[in-house]
Image (cartoon, rainbow, N blue to C red):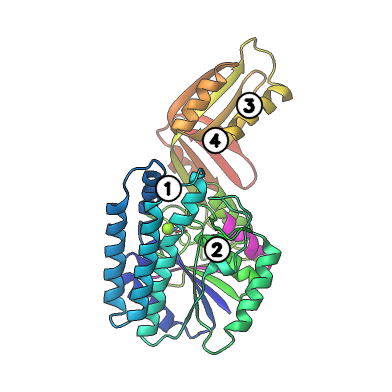
């Protein structure tokens, strides 16, 4: 079995849904599990509905916009599927009824029950369209397989239980062809509530299903033709990374390359399942392969540029050395406020970190100021270069002030202003 994943951008409208069928028709396999995200910006719209609901503000109009959009796409891509239309209407009616009721005390729980709907709608539509064009498939509710703990919005997967359920599923849909259409991003808690795996979690879902089902490979269909040595939307002369290792891909996504979610790679690596990143717009483009082999990792320097960074430098007021006690207190504050440190450096009396400039980071600065002298530089750029060479470093730093420079064997990092 192979796993295919289609993100929100690939199914944002009727043309996108039709294109999914086109991608499948190009692929000779019908032993496929197809993971689909919510359509376009549906998840964002559902988040707004949740926040309105928990603040007891009306959300009906917003929901009606989503209902109309989904029903009209379904009508375009599966015009005579009365059953699918009835089912979709039922989903919307149920959600509408929920929004008329009183929110429970837990906004995060409400979030998961409501935001998860986007994936249910999109998969109903995709499944109906595939049937309409003769691609037989079984729609599966991912919540019957993906068992998680009860941490709403960032649920953790119970791998053993999910594995048992996945094997059960395969036995059930043993017929040929075995195309299964299911949702990314969602699971269910031990209490039977819906849970979600964190924003942009569908890549991870695809990897999770591949792991559970011992799949042969995972293909993520994207609007870019693979992983590149830099963001092709920002830099003109980027190169396709046609074959890199899991380790390299994890490093790149950790430093901010947004093509694949870093969590996606671990389950695949554990079972040596290759990941293909390919373009849903150009089915002849080869894309990128990510697997165990690392011989190509160092061939092309890759770089990731993160703008909008804060360089914060923290000094004890009495100029005492930055000792472990201070550091553990500082780290605790960062963890508490969920501010991720992207780079750090220390001297005898100062500890410097680079973080995203966000309201949370600004609040943290104020909190740190209670115990430390804190200075910061805003508007910085954090540049990470893997497998660097001097021309690449020169190109990226030319004309800029270098506030921090760190180099290890494979990685060079700069804080620039
Ligand atoms: N629909 C979810 C989101 O937008 C999950 C995903 O797309 O990966 O975050
Ligand atoms: Mg999405």
**Distance between mark 2 and mark 3 Cα atoms:** 34 Å
Tell whether position 399 is magenta. Answer: no
Tell whether position 268 is magenta. Answer: yes
**Distance between mark 3 and mark 1 Cα atoms:** 40 Å
Q: Does residue 35 sit above or below 361 in this rendering?
A: below
Q: Decide: marks 2, 3 in contact (CB < 8 A)?
A: no
Residue under the point 50% across and 28% down? 311
Q: Nearer the viewer, residue 336 or 386?
A: 336
Q: Position of residue 30 (x, y in %)?
A: 50, 85
Front of the two marks 3 and 1: 1
Mark 2, ligand 1, within 8 Å: the answer is yes
Front of the two marks 2 and 1: 1
Q: Decide: marks 1, 4 in contact (CB < 8 A)?
A: no
Residue under the point 44% across and 64% down? 119
**Distance between mark 4 and mark 3 Cα atoms:** 11 Å
Residue lying farthest front? 101
State which region is magenta.
263-282
Q: Say which element carries label 1.
A: loop
- Alpha-carbon neighbours of circle 3 within 10 Å: few (<14), some, or many (≥20)? some
- Label whose residue precedes the other's in the sequence (3 or 1): 1
Mark number, residue 102: 1
Mark number, residue 330: 3
Residue under the point 46% across and 72% down? 286
- Alpha-carbon neighbours of circle 4 within 10 Å: few (<14), some, or many (≥20)? some
- Label whose residue precedes the other's in the sequence (2 or 1): 1
| Residue underneath mark 2 | 205
Mark 1, ligand 1, within 8 Å: the answer is no
């Amino acid at each position: 079995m192979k796993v295919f994943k289609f993100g929100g951008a690939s199914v944002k409208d009727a043309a996108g849904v039709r294109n999914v069928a086109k991608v499948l028709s190009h692929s000779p396999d019908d032993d496929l599990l197809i993971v689909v995200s919510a359509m376009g910006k549906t998840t964002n719209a559902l988040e707004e509905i949740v926040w309105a609901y928990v603040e007891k503000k009306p959300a009906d109009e917003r929901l009606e916009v989503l209902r109309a959009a989904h029903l009209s796409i379904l009508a375009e891509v599966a015009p005579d599927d009365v059953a699918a239309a009835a089912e979709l209407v039922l989903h919307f009616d149920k959600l509408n009824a929920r929004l008329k009721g009183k929110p429970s005390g837990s906004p995060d729980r409400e979030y998961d029950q409501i935001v998860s709907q986007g994936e249910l709608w999109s998969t109903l539509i995709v499944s109906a369209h595939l049937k309409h064009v003769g691609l037989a498939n079984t729609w599966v509710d991912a919540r019957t397989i993906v068992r998680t703990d009860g941490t709403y919005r960032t649920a953790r997967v119970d791998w053993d239980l999910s594995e048992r359920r996945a094997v059960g599923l395969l036995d059930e849909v043993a017929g040929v062809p075995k195309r299964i259409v299911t949702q990314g991003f969602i699971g269910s808690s031990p209490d039977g509530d819906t849970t979600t795996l964190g924003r942009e979690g569908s890549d991870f879902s695809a990897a999770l299903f591949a792991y559970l089902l011992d799949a042969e490979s995972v293909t993520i269909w994207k609007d870019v033709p693979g992983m590149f040595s830099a963001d092709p939307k920002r830099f003109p002369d980027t190169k396709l990374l046609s074959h890199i290792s899991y380790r390299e891909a994890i490093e790149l996504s950790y430093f901010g390359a947004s093509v694949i979610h870093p969590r996606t790679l671990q389950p695949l690596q554990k079972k040596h399942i290759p990941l293909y990143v390919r373009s849903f717009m150009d089915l002849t483009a080869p894309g990128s392969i990510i697997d165990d082999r690392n011989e190509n990792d160092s061939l092309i320097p890759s770089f990731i540029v993160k703008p909008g960074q804060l360089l914060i430098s923290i000094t004890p007021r009495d100029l005492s050395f930055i000792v472990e006690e201070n550091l553990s207190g500082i780290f605790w504050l960062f963890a508490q406020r969920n501010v991720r440190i992207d780079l750090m450096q220390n001297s005898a009396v100062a500890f410097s970190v680079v973080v995203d400039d966000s309201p949370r980071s600004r609040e943290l600065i104020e909190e740190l100021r209670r115990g430390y002298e804190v200075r910061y530089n805003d508007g910085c750029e954090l540049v990470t270069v893997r497998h660097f060479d001097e021309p690449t470093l020169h190109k990226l730093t030319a004309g800029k002030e270098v506030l921090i420079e760190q180099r290890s064997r494979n990685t060079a990092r700069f804080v620039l202003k």
